[in-house]
Image (tube, rainbow, N blue to C red):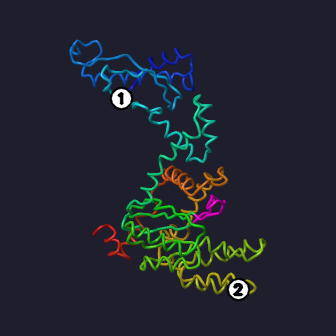
């Protein structure tokens, strides 16, 4: 439907130029449209329009209106809700006892998901729409997603996620009466279409291989049968936990984590030169060239044998990505996908200081995830990656596709 420009110009002129805000045109139009729609609902309920002689003798008729104030995107609006004489009319657009209409709750959830505190939301709604909203109402609206969160956490997963990223972030929350740093575990999976999704959020007192084992078991119990490559940081015992649940999966240690761990052993003056030499290792075209570069690195930095040892100890978890072409290497050599997500989540949580409980933390993180994931696109170079997977693991790929 298109409204003629002349009508819009006339409405704006009539409003004195006030379009949005507590006394704006948008509010008056919303009121008029709501009342018109409610009147239409009553027409349908009664079976005849106002003043229509078809209504004579039907046993039910209009019975005036009752005043009701509702909150919406244009602020508080007082509307006249039509009634019927028998009291059987149940409006659908604005139900009985409903004080907010569609869009208002979504606005609160969107602001909450952006990291705004309850006080921030109250101030914004008051300044923009002249609406006074209690902290209890905001909590009620945000708590309404808790059932949705539980369903999301328990939802069935796809049988195959060719690539999975696993990592954890620290969030302050109250636990057993004390504010603690607690680990929030995150898993991102890329499905066979190349689409990323967060597979779940879990909370524990700290990050450890034992907890990751429980999380991986949860993923398997929810239907995830296989992953070709799982990318992780260098947490001790992590690869063994993965292989205990998914024995056929390649475990790729994040190269960026390896570089950080290496450079932590040297002074700031030495880091630039050493980073350039480390690049010769992980940018090598083959495993053999990489091994030669590692030995050359060890010989060049005899006083920093501990750095070379970091790579030697983790070598079997470093080299899997050398078996793949550049398109796949870019996808799996780092856990940047999940670290970027964690950076976004930290921006959302920083205004909170700490959360009163685990439930409050997960609620906010879930809402933030839903917002940020809408911007995710399919992984670049995924077609080539899938072709490589089809050559290397044809049976596993076929099983993952349901064949």
Check disc 2: other Cα within 10 Å, few if <14, some if 14-19, many if 20+. Answer: few
SS of the residue under disc 2: helix
Q: Position of residue 355 (x, y in %)?
A: 62, 54
From the viewer's side, name the closer residue of 358 and 33. 358
Instruction: Give the position of the C terminus as an image quadrant.
Output: bottom left
In the image, taking residue 202 as reference, residue 91 lies left or right, namely left
291 vs 389: above or below: below
What's the residue at 75%, 76% (across, down)? 266
Question: In the picture shown, does residue 178 fall above or below 300?
Answer: above
Look at the image and say whether residue 325 sits in the magenta stretch: no
7 vs 337: above or below: above
- Give yes or no for contact between labels 2 and 1 (Cβ–Cβ under 8 Å): no
Q: Choose top left, top right, bottom left or bottom right for residue 112.
A: top right
Number of the front mark, 2 or 1: 1
Near mark 1 (Cα within 10 A), the count class, few <14, some 14-19 or many ≥20, is: some
Q: CA distance from mark 2 to mark 1?
A: 76 Å
Q: Is residue 172 magenta?
A: yes
The residue indicated by pointer 1 is: 91
Q: Nearer the viewer, residue 248 or 140?
A: 140
Image quadrant in which the N terminus is located: top left
Observer-nearest of 349 and 319? 349
Q: Position of residue 397 (x, y in %)?
A: 35, 71
Instruction: Name the residue: 56% across, 69% down.
Output: 334
Residue 133: which disc? none
Magenta span of residues: 168-183
The residue indicated by pointer 2 is: 305
Predominant secondary structure in magenta?
strand
Q: Residue at x 48, y 60 (%)?
A: 198
Residue 358 visible? The answer is yes
Q: Is residue 5 above or below residue 299?
A: above
């Amino acid at each position: 439907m298109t409204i003629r420009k002349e009508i819009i110009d006339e409405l704006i002129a009539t409003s004195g130029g006030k379009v949005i805000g507590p006394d704006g045109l948008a509010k008056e139009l919303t009121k008029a449209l709501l009342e018109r729609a409610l009147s239409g609902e009553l027409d349908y309920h009664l079976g005849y329009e106002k003043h229509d002689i078809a209504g004579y003798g039907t046993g039910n008729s209009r019975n005036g209106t009752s005043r009701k104030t509702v909150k919406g995107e244009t602020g508080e609006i007082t509307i006249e809700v039509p009634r019927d004489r028998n009291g059987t009319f149940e409006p659908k657009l604005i139900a009985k006892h409903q004080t907010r209409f569609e869009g208002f709750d979504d606005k609160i959830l969107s602001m909450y998901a952006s990291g705004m505190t309850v006080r921030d939301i109250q101030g914004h709604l008051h300044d923009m729409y002249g609406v006074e909203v209690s902290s209890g109402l905001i909590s009620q609206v945000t708590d309404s997603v808790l059932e949705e969160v539980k369903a999301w956490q328990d939802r069935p997963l796809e049988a195959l996620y060719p690539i999975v990223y696993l990592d954890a972030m620290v969030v302050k929350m109250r636990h057993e009466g004390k504010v603690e740093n607690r680990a929030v575990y995150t898993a991102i999976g890329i499905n066979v279409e190349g689409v990323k999704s967060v597979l779940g959020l879990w909370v524990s007192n700290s990050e450890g291989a034992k907890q990751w084992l429980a999380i991986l078991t949860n993923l398997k119990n929810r239907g995830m049968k296989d992953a070709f490559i799982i990318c992780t940081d260098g947490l001790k015992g992590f690869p063994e936990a993965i292989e205990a649940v998914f024995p056929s999966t390649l475990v790729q240690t994040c190269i960026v984590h390896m570089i950080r761990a290496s450079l932590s052993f040297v002074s700031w003056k030495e880091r630039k030169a050493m980073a350039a030499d480390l690049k010769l290792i992980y940018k090598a075209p083959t495993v053999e060239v990489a091994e030669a570069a590692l030995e050359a690195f060890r010989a060049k930095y005899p006083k920093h044998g501990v750095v070379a040892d970091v790579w030697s100890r983790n070598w079997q978890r470093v080299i899997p990505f050398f078996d793949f072409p550049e398109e796949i290497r870019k996808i799996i050599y780092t856990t940047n996908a999940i670290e970027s997500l964690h950076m976004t989540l930290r921006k959302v949580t920083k205004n909170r200081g700490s959360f009163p409980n685990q439930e409050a933390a997960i609620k906010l993180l879930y809402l933030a995830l839903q917002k940020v994931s809408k911007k995710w696109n399919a992984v670049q170079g995924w077609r080539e990656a899938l072709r490589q997977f089809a050559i290397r693991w044809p049976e596993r790929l076929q099983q993952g596709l349901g064949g």
